[in-house]
Image: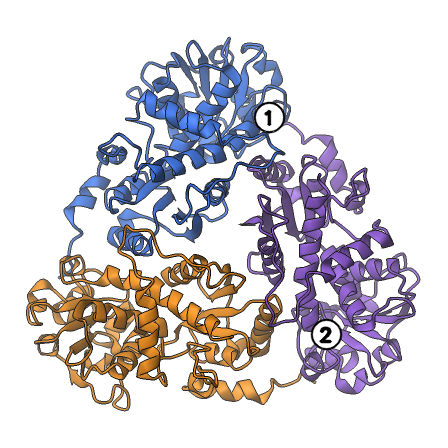
Chain colours: A purple, B blue, C orange
């Protein structure tokens, strides 16, 4: 008779908020995993941003290097190997002196949950210390975190539509660099908010950091349910949604989602929800424009806006490496 | 007129025992290649195990690192890039200070023998010192070994159904750690022995090390020919085959092979040849359970056995990195 | 409305000589990019060969290592990941102390020019210093070079049929090692010259270095247009083409190109344009034989010639790593 999987992991997967079940923090308060921004305190987030700020150098200057991960092994487990996020994590780890191995693996708990965990146990037995996991399925990083040994850490590099915690941190760092504060800012998140892990992680990060006004701007079909983004004002119109804001966070739209929103082509989507320079003028004069990339230029954002003086999109990328260095250093430092 | 390939490599490939044609040992007795366990002396194997033991650290402790491969270049040539064995070799080489390049290549001598060798010559001219080769075809690592220059070494990372020498060594090391000896042990190898390079390398290693009783347990269709595994007692029944043994080595069964063995589904295979905790009780009380991975949990082994107190499966993985470090260090050290 | 791409890059792509539009040299005369050999001075090429010569070690000796790229990040952007040229660049960068990331990306400007550039900007923001680009489309490396920030460099690792500059350099270095001079040499380039970036880069390099007699030997259908390879004598017959030459550079023939040249199979191609040992005897007794690899043994070159005493094919590979080290070091050193 075929053995059923042990109930522990199966239970975990049946809960959407699986990540929350595993504590991300050690008993001494130090960060052990980073699966989601939810549940982190303002002080914890600020400490990570402070640490990341030390790793930021202007583009064109030599990056900060250190040896705080000397002797540490980081495994990047990505379902697709050639993503920018994989490169960002790989360089972050290498610049801190870690050994890095890249694996292209399909970590799907539904298909073969236990053999997925066996892959993890195998890497753990090869002295892998940090598992960086990107997976289409939201529960996987949390599931892995609940099964690794005490010395190992799990970092989510983007999980389903639910969370992308290092993206939330790099977005916050980028805003802080431009605005020097979070208090009193008004931020608009625009586009396919319903399916966006970027939007969710930004909302959790920024609201914890004290941003009081977060607006959600989306066509009806791409608007999240009412039990999410609580406290955010919702706008169907881009013009009203960005009026007077300090920060505009544009999201990537998938082509197949435009149809759902009854905007059958890119031109019509751009006409209603694309950020042109004319529209950008409705925001504050010193408003900044963000995008998690990859951009659909001419669909959700005009090229002259993406490359214009208010755009901080490349700062976000640069800050991404710094934030990942900070998270890696924090989880390893806390082991002692 | 198309030139025929030189007779040398063509001859080699027509012999199943091709690896044996290339001496693995230098004239001074040091190890140069590792293609198969066959032909190694007990002293050579013991020296590798001694060396490997120094590289073993408990999971959770920092791995041993050294610089004995500083300036050395290791190329991993795998037909599939994301295997655990590739990661094990990659980390072993990096932790000894080597530069590592990974290539996903189809090294097939039959299709294009000479262009395969040209790939090797190219890497050799790039100052690659060690070729780690995993290939479905048994003759390939030996063929490469017979063509590289005197300073270069070839390590098989698994060749067809014939040999997987580092697996044989790590299995021996795992048994030695648990049992402190080889003399007087009784070992059962269970499952698809006929097609298993793991079984063949275990048999060669353990018999050379003085294990006197090695049992082979398999359904008739998966039992090796009589000219192999000589001296091993053969069992069709799992219960009798593991009765009173010290070590149970389970093998992975391929789904398509179950049909051959007239066990049309996983449940029936498990019923006859799967290792459950009830069955495990027939072995000695302190018997250890091994598996080369990846496991088909619920098919050849029950999950509670794989994760239970008698399982040393994760020790095998940890020892795998140590054994690969030892082999890499030995072949490089011997060049001087 | 969908934004059109900015005119700058679109213009560039409509010109075959796109690389020439971007200056490869800084205002102080130092090399910044290497996109094509065209436009480099004899002194610049000689300086690169001098630098490369210091990185050459006999096969079997330990390669030269240095730290002149310490803190530098090199990104290999290849459409196919497992090429020999990628390994050559990767080892060159690692042996100089660089951090290396490999990406398998389709850099096609026609399909999605701007998102291609966004990939580059993203890597630039991750502090990538050197972009090594191999792409089927000739304009891409030059396009990237015209968009990166002043501190960044772009090296072409082979662009369409137009140029393969490091191949031109390694070929020149190989000839120099064998012949100690360029003056007075006679060089025959044989095969599919029409479609060969190797032939074009060799022609540019060798003619700049003072080789006065460069012959082009090809069937009519594979002979380049008359406005190219100016000053080169053209031969339809291999026997006359190589008569009395010092250097024979064989090119790889694609199977589909043989049909174009009305040679329907490999045997007939070999009979007319394959280099056999009998034919090689028509060249000078000390003539050297070169091939950029991968070889079609028995089609454009006989195996005994490829492996014979006049072949310098493996020297070319060894010199390839040295040339790439030299180019990497030169572009980084010149930044100061």
Viewer-side residue, B217 vs A122: A122
Tell me the distance, in whole angstroms, between the alpha carbons under discs 2 and 1. Answer: 51 Å
Does residue B162 appear to the left or right of A106 in the view shown?
A: left
- Whether labels 2 and 1 share one chain: no
From the image, tell me which residue sits under label 2. Answer: A312
| In this view, the mark in front (2 or 1) | 2
Q: Is residue B196 visible?
A: no
Counting from the top left corner in percent of width and height, residue B239 is at: 52, 12
Please name the residue that numbered disc 1 is placed on: B306
User: Can you see residue B212?
Assistant: yes
The spot of residue C278 in percent (x, y) is: 6, 65
Does B113 appear above or below A144?
below
Q: Secondary structure at mark 1?
A: helix
Chain for numbered disc 2: A
Q: Is residue A54 left or right of residue B265?
A: right
Which residue in the rendered view is the most extreme toward the bottom? C227
Q: Observer-nearest residue: C115 or B149?
A: B149
In which quarter of the view is residue A122 placed?
top right
Q: In the image, is residue C155 above or below residue C65? A: below
The residue that appears at 74% across and 78% down in the rendered structure is A269
């Amino acid at each position: 008779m075929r053995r059923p999987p042990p109930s522990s992991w199966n239970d975990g997967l049946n809960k959407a908020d699986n990540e929350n079940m595993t504590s991300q923090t050690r008993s001494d308060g130090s960060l052990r995993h980073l699966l989601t921004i939810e549940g982190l305190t303002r002080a914890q987030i600020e400490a990570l941003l402070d640490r990341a700020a030390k790793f930021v150098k202007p583009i064109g200057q030599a990056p900060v290097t250190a040896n705080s991960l000397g002797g540490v092994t980081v495994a990047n487990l990505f379902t697709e190997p050639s993503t920018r996020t994989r490169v960002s994590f790989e360089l972050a780890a290498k610049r801190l002196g870690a050994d890095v191995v890249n694996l292209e693996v399909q970590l799907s708990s539904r298909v073969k949950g236990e053999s997925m965990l066996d892959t993890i146990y195998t890497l753990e037995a090869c002295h892998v210390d940090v598992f960086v996991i990107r997976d289409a399925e939201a529960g996987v990083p949390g599931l892995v975190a609940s099964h690794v040994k005490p010395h190992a850490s799990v970092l989510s590099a983007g999980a389903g539509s639910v969370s992308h915690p290092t993206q939330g941190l790099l977005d916050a760092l980028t805003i802080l660099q431009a605005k020097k504060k979070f208090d009193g800012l008004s931020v608009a998140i625009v586009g396919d908010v319903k399916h966006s892990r970027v939007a969710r992680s930004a909302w959790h990060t920024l609201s914890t950091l004290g941003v009081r006004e977060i607006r959600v701007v989306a066509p009806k079909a791409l608007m999240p349910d009412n039990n999410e983004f609580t406290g955010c004002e919702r706008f169907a119109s881009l013009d009203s949604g960005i009026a007077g804001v300090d920060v505009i966070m544009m999201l990537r739209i998938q082509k197949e989602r435009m149809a759902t929103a009854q905007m059958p082509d890119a031109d019509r989507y751009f006409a209603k929800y694309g950020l042109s320079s004319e529209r950008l003028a409705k925001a504050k004069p010193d408003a900044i424009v963000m995008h998690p990339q990859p951009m659909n230029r001419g669909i959700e954002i005009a090229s002259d806006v993406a490359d214009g003086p208010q755009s901080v999109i490349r700062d976000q990328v640069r800050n991404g490496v710094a934030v990942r260095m900070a998270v890696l250093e924090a989880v390893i430092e806390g082991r002692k």
